[in-house]
Amino acid sequence: MKKLTFLAALIVTIAGTAACSSTQKTEGQGMVSVVAQNVVRIAGKEAMADLDLSRANERRAYVDVTGFADAFSAGYIENLVRNRAEVDGGRLVTEANADIVIEVAVNAAGNDVGISSYVVGGSSRSEGTVDLTITLRDSRTGERISRQQVVGYAKYQQGTFLGISGSGAYFVLKNDSWEIVDDPSYY
């Protein structure tokens, strides 16, 4: 009987401490949490770090965003690329006056929310991705000047233990390892 009771207690303990995990897309109109905004912003900034638009230097450029870009992310992605084009010396103009078109194909831009739960604790996270294919094209001939794919990943993770939430942290993926972001507002 003691062995049976011990075995039953062991099975309940193992089943009770096993992790349950889920990931869901963040959705809905209106206000998006600052955490969700920060992870996408950090991922976007990381993606822009690898983008080279030096061929736009001293040229009139127009940015055209297509792909997986909804009304919420399209403006953000366009702003990222327009800013980078100006940093690299491009002069932004209307499409009719452009020497080159900077085509931005959004492969992914957004975030997901994940939750892992245990009997005594768990964790929640928000993961952000910005994945873009950038093509510079001569607006007169249609000739492709250059093409690059840039990607950035970020996440926010916060743990709980016995119902008490701990402080969370932002991370950015650099060279296949997650690095902590000290202050997301300055990243």
Image: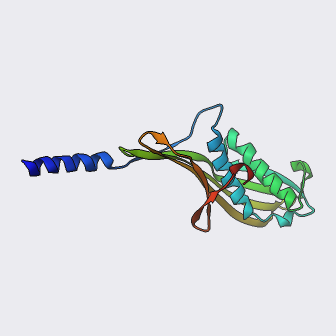
Q: Position of residue 89 (x, y in %)?
A: 89, 61
* Residue ranking furthest to the left: 1
Q: Position of residue 173 (x, y in %)?
A: 61, 61
Q: Position of residue 165 (x, y in %)?
A: 50, 42
Residue 33 to residue 57: above or below: above
Can you see residue 68?
no
Q: Position of residue 100 (x, y in %)?
A: 86, 59
- The mark total stands at 0
Question: What residue is drawn where x is 57% and y is 67%?
Answer: 176
Nearer to the camera, 9 or 76: 9
Nearer to the camera, 170 or 78: 170
Q: Is residue 163 left or right of residue 94?
A: left
Q: Is residue 22 left or right of residue 119?
A: right
Question: What residue is drawn where x is 79% and y is 61%?
Answer: 136
Quarter containing the C terminus: bottom right
Residue 130, quarter of the rendered image = bottom right
Can you see residue 59?
yes
Nearer to the camera, 28 or 19: 19
* Residue ranking furthest to the top: 30
Residue 7 to residue 30: above or below: below
Q: Is residue 53 left or right of residue 59?
A: left
Question: What residue is drawn where x is 64% and y is 37%?
Answer: 32
Coloration mode: rainbow
